[in-house]
Image: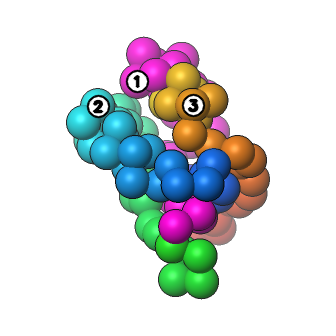
């Protein structure tokens, strides 16, 4: 299994618009329905709920996650990020069985 924690640091005042765009475009459900997706969930920061959104992704294999990055909804997500996100931090991890 492989995982990714993605911290989105939103542009000032853009959190609601970003979340609305994610929901209206069904991004999470489309990702969850991909082959090999084990988890795809967003969480708002308790310390900075207006500016930081955490995405936790877990995939059966690194290859499944790589295929994910070629999907049309992933490309749309990149467009939304360009519009609403100031900075993105990625943390990759692998889990032992």
Q: Determine the CA span between mark 3 and mark 2.
A: 15 Å
The residue drawn where x is 52% and y is 83% is 46
Q: Quadrant of the C terminus?
A: bottom right
The residue drawn where x is 56% and y is 40% is 84
Give the left or right position of residue 24, taking residue 91 as reference: left
Badge 3 marks a residue whose secondary structure is helix
Badge 2 marks a residue whose secondary structure is loop
* Category of crowding for the residue at label 3, using alpha-carbon neighbours closer than 10 angstroms: few (below 14), some (14–19), many (at least 20): some
Q: Nearer the viewer, mark 3 or mark 2?
A: 3
Where residue 14 appears, x then y in whole percent?
Answer: 51, 49
Circle nearer the N terminus (3, 2): 2
Q: Which residue lies furthest to the front in this view?
A: 13
Q: In which quarter of the image is the N terminus?
A: bottom right
- Residue at the disc numbered 1: 73
The answer to whether one can see residue 8 in this image is no
The residue drawn where x is 43% and y is 59% is 42
Q: Residue 83 carries which label?
A: 3
* Category of crowding for the residue at label 2, using alpha-carbon neighbours closer than 10 angstroms: few (below 14), some (14–19), many (at least 20): some
Looking at the picture, does residue 14 appear above or below residue 43? above
- Residue at the disc numbered 2: 25
Where residue 21 appears, x then y in whole percent?
Answer: 35, 38
Cβ atoms under marks 1 and 3 closer than 8 Å = no
Task: Give the extent of the magenta segment.
Answer: 50-76
Looking at the picture, does residue 17 appear above or below residue 82? below
Give the left or right position of residue 15, taking residue 16 as reference: right
- Is residue 81 highlighted in magenta? no
* Category of crowding for the residue at label 1, using alpha-carbon neighbours closer than 10 angstroms: few (below 14), some (14–19), many (at least 20): some
């Amino acid at each position: 299994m492989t995982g990714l924690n993605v911290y989105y640091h939103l542009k000032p005042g853009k959190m609601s618009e970003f979340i609305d765009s994610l929901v209206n475009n069904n991004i999470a459900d489309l990702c969850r329905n991909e082959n090999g997706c084990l988890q795809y969930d967003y969480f708002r920061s308790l310390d900075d709920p207006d500016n930081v959104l955490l995405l936790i992704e877990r995939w059966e294999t690194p290859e499944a996650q790589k295929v994910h990055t070629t999907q049309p909804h992933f490309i749309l997500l990149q467009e939304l990020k360009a519009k609403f996100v100031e900075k993105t931090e990625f943390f990759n991890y692998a889990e032992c069985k």
